[in-house]
């Protein structure tokens, strides 16, 4: 069941990402062409700042998720309801804070940012951008946590994907008609709120046993403040760069940055989709047989890391040709920069390739033990980014992130291996080193080949060809270097395939008996 749900999560998640990617590519370009780079920078800047409000959910959401893994694995509905009651109570209380935080941002932001867009328009855009999230947070947060803990992320993915399709189609139509940008964001607000109805209907039909009137188990989510520290660190890396550029540079520089970030955010989303599809299985497996969990964990780390490196290898090779095509006709600022892709790739490798180790710390519930490390990571990132942006401009914020990530990634890998697995961290660092060597070799080879990409079709074809070649290289080398892990993964996948073909097993059994 766990494996089946993981595959459903992965399948639905990837389909969702493909649809979102295809539709999402149209919107930034339409904004830049019709309203200018400054408007694009403004929308992106507001979106990144509002995402900080997710911190209100971050601590209790992750703490509740970790607390739910065990009762979900034993189907203890009484304990599940008690944890959800505590979670719901917290969401309702902080939902009010979320609402007023959006109002405060709408009042202050227009007087802080330097923009030719009038202040009233900026205020209204902020309200439409933020209020949808506030309402969703208040009503559906607890439902989302339960679905993830049960390995049913595909349900949330389906609802959100349908909403995103409608949202993007409406926004694209309005942008092509040259409608005021305020009306565009208003449509985003309306369609975001409609998700609440869909979640409510699903939960009412499929979770009739849910009872939030039980005594809340606040002790189960007592680590929410420690979890919050870790989530702040994560959000710092996702959003602080845009905020610092907004304050220390201008919205056109922000627009350049977010165009590259748009591509690498897609990578993040794909990676998190794959990770989310397996994380619940890892979380439930952690409370079972220790040896089985370690084998599962090692297989996941090797092949997940290989996936990350292969995706970023392909993106690094095709991103500049794509950017030349995507920003053609936008002449108010130069979007082609040869250093940004390299810096972004380093940041994303350090961020995403440590995911397996970070998962282990989260699943084990070692939030409080590692919170100081997260605080230090955030301090290094913010301090170094502000310092470097003064000297290196747009490159400075990425250099600041790299400085902090070098410290924290090493720390996470060492902690996960030494404290939780009781082994040398060289096991993971060796896997990193092998993948870095492959990445360097592939990039150097493609530079020698001097690929000529002059159309969107060329970008897609070369990305597909490179992906087909590169992913097997990473996986083959990883399998050859760690034969035992490969054999475990192979047997695991074979058993899973057999479960999906029960009819074939019955035929085989009857043939064996007849012989």
Image (tube, helix red, strand yellow):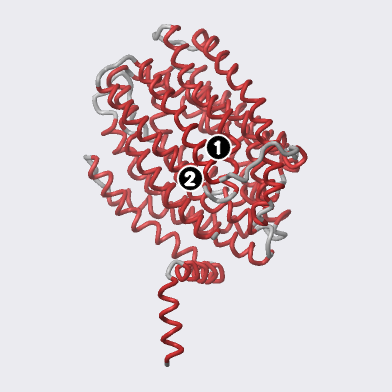
Question: In the picture, which quadrant includes the N terminus?
Answer: bottom right
Residue 155 badge: 2
Looking at the rendered structure, the secondary structure element under dot 1 is helix
Question: In the picture, which quadrant includes the C terminus?
Answer: bottom left
Name the residue nearer the viewer: 162 or 371: 162
Q: Residue at 32% of width from left, 22% of height from top? A: 31
Q: Residue at 29% of width from left, 54% of height from top? A: 465
Name the residue nearer the viewer: 253 or 17: 17
Q: Is residue 109 above or below residue 172?
A: above
Report if residue 391 is visible in the image: no
Q: At which x and y percent is residue 383?
A: 62, 26
Looking at the rendered structure, the secondary structure element under dot 2 is helix
Q: At which x and y percent is residue 506?
A: 44, 78
Q: Residue at 49% of width from left, 63% of height from top? A: 478
**Mark 1 lies on residue:** 402
- The answer to which image quadrant residue 222 occupies is top right
Give the Cα separation between the discs numbered 1 and 2: 35 Å
Q: Residue furthest bottom?
A: 515
Crowding at mark 1 (Cα within 10 Å: few <14, some 14-19, many 20+): many
Q: Residue furthest right?
A: 219
Q: At which x and y percent is residue 274?
A: 48, 50
Give the number of marks. 2
Crowding at mark 2 (Cα within 10 Å: few <14, some 14-19, many 20+): some
Q: Nearer the viewer, mark 1 or mark 2?
A: 2
Q: At which x and y percent is residue 237?
A: 55, 33
Q: Is residue 167 above or below residue 368?
A: above
Report if residue 515 is visible in the image: yes
């Amino acid at each position: 069941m766990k494996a089946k749900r993981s595959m459903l999560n992965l399948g639905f998640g990837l389909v969702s990402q493909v649809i979102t990617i295809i539709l999402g590519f149209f919107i930034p370009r339409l904004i830049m062409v019709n309203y200018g780079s400054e408007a694009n920078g403004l929308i992106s800047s507001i979106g990144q700042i509002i995402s900080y409000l997710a911190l209100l959910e971050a601590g209790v959401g992750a703490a509740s998720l970790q607390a739910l893994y065990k009762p979900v694995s034993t189907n203890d509905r009484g304990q599940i309801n008690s944890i959800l009651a505590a979670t719901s109570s917290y969401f309702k209380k902080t939902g009010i804070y979320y609402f007023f935080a959006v109002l405060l941002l709408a009042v202050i932001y227009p007087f802080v940012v330097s923009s030719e867009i009038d202040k009233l328009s900026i205020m209204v855009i902020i309200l439409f951008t933020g209020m949808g999230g506030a309402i969703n947070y208040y009503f559906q947060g607890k439902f989302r946590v339960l679905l993830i803990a049960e390995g049913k992320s595909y349900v949330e993915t389906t609802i959100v994907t349908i909403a995103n399709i409608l949202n993007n189609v409406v926004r694209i139509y309005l942008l092509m008609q040259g409608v005021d940008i305020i009306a565009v964001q208003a449509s985003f607000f309306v369609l975001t709120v409609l998700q609440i109805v869909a979640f409510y209907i699903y939960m009412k039909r499929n979770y009739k046993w849910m009872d939030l009137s039980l005594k809340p188990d606040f002790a189960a989510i007592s680590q929410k403040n420690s979890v919050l520290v870790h989530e702040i660190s994560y959000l710092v890396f996702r959003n602080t760069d845009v905020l610092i550029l907004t304050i220390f540079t201008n919205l056109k520089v922000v627009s350049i940055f977010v165009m590259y970030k748009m591509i690498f955010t897609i990578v993040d989303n794909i990676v998190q989709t794959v990770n989310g599809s397996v994380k619940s299985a890892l979380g439930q497996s952690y409370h079972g047989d220790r040896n089985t969990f370690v084998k599962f964990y090692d297989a996941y780390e090797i092949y997940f890391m290989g996936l990350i490196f292969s995706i970023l290898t392909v993106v690094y090779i095709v991103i500049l040709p794509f950017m030349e095509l995507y920003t053609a006709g936008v002449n108010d600022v130069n979007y082609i920069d040869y250093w940004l892709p390299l810096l972004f790739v380093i940041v994303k490798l350090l961020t995403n390739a440590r995911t397996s180790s970070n998962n282990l710390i989260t699943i084990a519930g070692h939030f409080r033990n590692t919170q100081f490390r997260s605080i230090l990571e955030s301090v290094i990132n913010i301090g170094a980014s502000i310092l470097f942006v003064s000297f290196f401009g747009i490159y400075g914020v990425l250099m600041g992130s790299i400085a902090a990530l070098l410290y924290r990634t090493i720390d996470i890998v060492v902690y996960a291996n030494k404290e939780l697995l009781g082994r040398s961290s060289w096991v993971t660092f060796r896997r990193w080193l092998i993948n870095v060597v492959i990445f360097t070799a592939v990039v150097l080879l493609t530079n020698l080949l001097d690929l000529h990409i002059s159309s969107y079709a060329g970008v897609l074809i070369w990305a597909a060809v490179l992906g087909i070649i590169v992913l097997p290289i990473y996986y083959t080398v990883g399998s050859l270097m760690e034969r035992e892990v490969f054999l475990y993964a192979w047997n695991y996948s074979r058993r899973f395939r057999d479960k999906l073909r029960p009819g074939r097993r019955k035929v085989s059994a009857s043939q064996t008996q007849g012989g």
